[in-house]
Image (cartoon, rainbow, N blue to C red):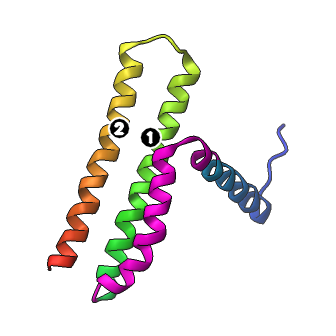
Amino acid sequence: MKNEATGFARLIAAFGFSRKGLKLAYVSEAAFRQEVWLAVVMLPAAWFVGDTSLERALLAASILLLMVVELLNTAIEKVVDRIGAEFHELSGAAKDIGSAAVLLTIVLVTIVWLGVILG
């Protein structure tokens, strides 16, 4: 039987894994680094751009969603790369679909920000 952490110890361990993943993504992925710096600028800007709490939340959520999708895309790419370096149609498709998810999220961020700004 495996000795797994439970309760608060599990939460602490999960936080550590998440921190490690964020650091790895920041160090290894230029796109994620760019999005982190975008968030550093845009999250405070959301406070000034949004007139209501809902607008501010939507602006902030769109930026955070972009970062989440980028992390998931990076995870897909890492797994595909782990499987093998040789080209395979399904590996290429997985990477392309992940990239498309990031692109659609960028479109969503643009729509939300323009919608609130142009209101």
- Residue 103 on the magenta span: no
Work out whether 75 lies above or below 48.
above
Rate crowding at label 2 as few (under 14), some (14 to 19) or many (20 or more) other CA atoms within 10 Å. some
**Picture coordinates of residue 45 (x, y %)?**
38, 78
Work out whether 101 lies above or below 90.
below
Apparent side of residue 66 relative to residue 77 in the rendered image (left or right): left
Res 73 quadrant in image: top left
Work out whether 39 lies above or below 90.
below
- The residue lying at 48 percent from left, 31 percent from top is 77
**Picture coordinates of residue 53 (x, y %)?**
34, 86
Please, what is the three-letter code of the amino acid marked with disc 2? Ser
Rate crowding at label 1 as few (under 14), some (14 to 19) or many (20 or more) other CA atoms within 10 Å. many
- The residue lying at 77 percent from left, 57 percent from top is 6
Image quarter where the N terminus lies is top right
3D distance between C-alphas at marks 1 and 2: 7 Å
Badge 2 is on which residue? Answer: 99
Apparent side of residue 8 relative to residue 62 in the rendered image (left or right): right
- The residue lying at 43 percent from left, 63 percent from top is 38
Please, what is the three-letter code of the amino acid marked with disc 1? Asn
Nearest to the observer: residue 26 or residue 57: 26
Nearest to the observer: residue 105 or residue 114: 114
Q: Main secondary structure of the magenta part?
A: helix
Apparent side of residue 95 relative to residue 75 in the rendered image (left or right): left
Q: Which residues are magenta?
A: 24-51
Badge 1 is on which residue? Answer: 73
- Residue 30 on the magenta span: yes
Image quarter where the C terminus lies is bottom left
Res 54 quadrant in image: bottom left
